[in-house]
Image: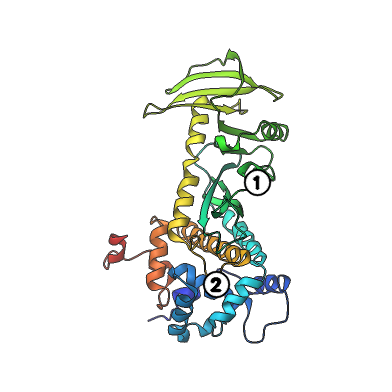
Amino acid sequence: MSHNNTVLNQVVRFFKRHEFETLARKYHVGHQFRSFSRWSQFTAMLVGQLTGRKSLRDLVDNLKVQGHKLYHLGTRDVPRSTLARVNEEQPHQLYKELFHKLLGRCQTIAPKNRFKLDAKLYLLDATVINLCLKVFPWASYQKTKGAIKLHVGLSADGYLPEFFDVTTGKEHEINWARLLKLPTGSFVVFDRGYTDYDWYQTLMDSGIFFVARLKDNALVEYFKKRPGRRSQGVLTDQEISLNGIKGSLRLVHFVAEDGNEYRFVTNANHIPAALVAELYKERWQIELFFKWIKQNLKIKAFYGTSENAVLTQIWIALCVYLVLAWLKFMSKITISMQQMLRLLQLNLFERRDLESLFKPTKALPNPQLALL
């Protein structure tokens, strides 16, 4: 019988230790650690994400129970007070940069988007996570409420969060969107919350194509209808202009199968009208992304209350998402990422081959898969 390390050990191998230590030295403040390290912090918080521990005390107690299975990870005992202090004080930027390094690796093997576009496709949206203002006084939102806002630009190639940032809840989405450095020739899809004609003009001047919902009160000047046979569901396809925008735009009036009507505005004159509607429909994937991370990762309840502790936890959670995406891309398995995470939770400290964990044999079907 071949020897296997624990599932956790095999997951941790995804993170290059020498690369991590370089980042740890780069993002360190204060005195050097005596008996603790950023690696110990990371592995502890990683376990917290993979096992869904409810509190810092719960996490530390779990690590103590599994202590004899953690020695090979290069981590030491994790005192609760020490972990809390490191989360509060040591810069979260370490994990933000780690996320981007992992993202680059995932992008090299991510499947292409389902559209026949010779360009990148990004889906923009934001979601709010409510917090208690008394506990998180830095997370200003409303007069008596606190919140943070997650801003995401999801790539349709593998549905990876290629652009990601966290702000206070009161920060408007458009302020974040204006700072994005989208590649020339790419497509970006967003809802009416991003309506800003100056930004539309910037996108057009930069050679970036956009698809958005047109506001009902938009001041539109209508021109000739575009030639060609209209596809099913397309009611109107014509040239328009919007007040304050230089250059021709396009209005696609579309009726969905459920009878709802939508008016899309775009500067992509070279694609079929039906594809304009399909691109906007793809935006639903970012809603699914938000739903997934909120249900499966620890990004709604936090182990610390400072801004740095919260951001540390969120960036590590996103690193976990990328690990799951990497495993799914590499192994080409058909089960969902939620099923993968559940199997990891059930077997994290077991000595099993990671790949076979997601590919149970036909002779011995895994009963857990039927329950997930």
Task: Decide: is 168 above or below 226.
Answer: below
Task: Decide: is 199 above or below 323.
Answer: above
Q: Is residue 189 left or right of residue 19?
A: left
Q: Residue furthest top?
A: 224
Q: From the top left corner, tell me how far across and down residue 333 is, in percent.
A: 41, 57
Q: Nearer the viewer, residue 312 or 364?
A: 312
Residue at image x 49%, y 72%?
Answer: 47
Q: Nearer the viewer, residue 29 or 182?
A: 29
> What kind of element bears circle 2?
loop
Disc number for residue 13: 2
Label 1 sits on what residue type? Trp
Q: Nearer the viewer, residue 207 or 176?
A: 176
Residue at image x 58%, y 51%?
Answer: 141
Q: From the top left corner, tell me how far across and down residue 35 is, in percent.
A: 63, 86
Q: Which residue is mark 1?
A: 176
* Label pair 1/2, CB-CB below 8 angstroms: no
Disc number for residue 70: none
Q: From the top left corner, tell me how far across and down residue 242 is, in percent.
A: 64, 23
* Colour theme: rainbow
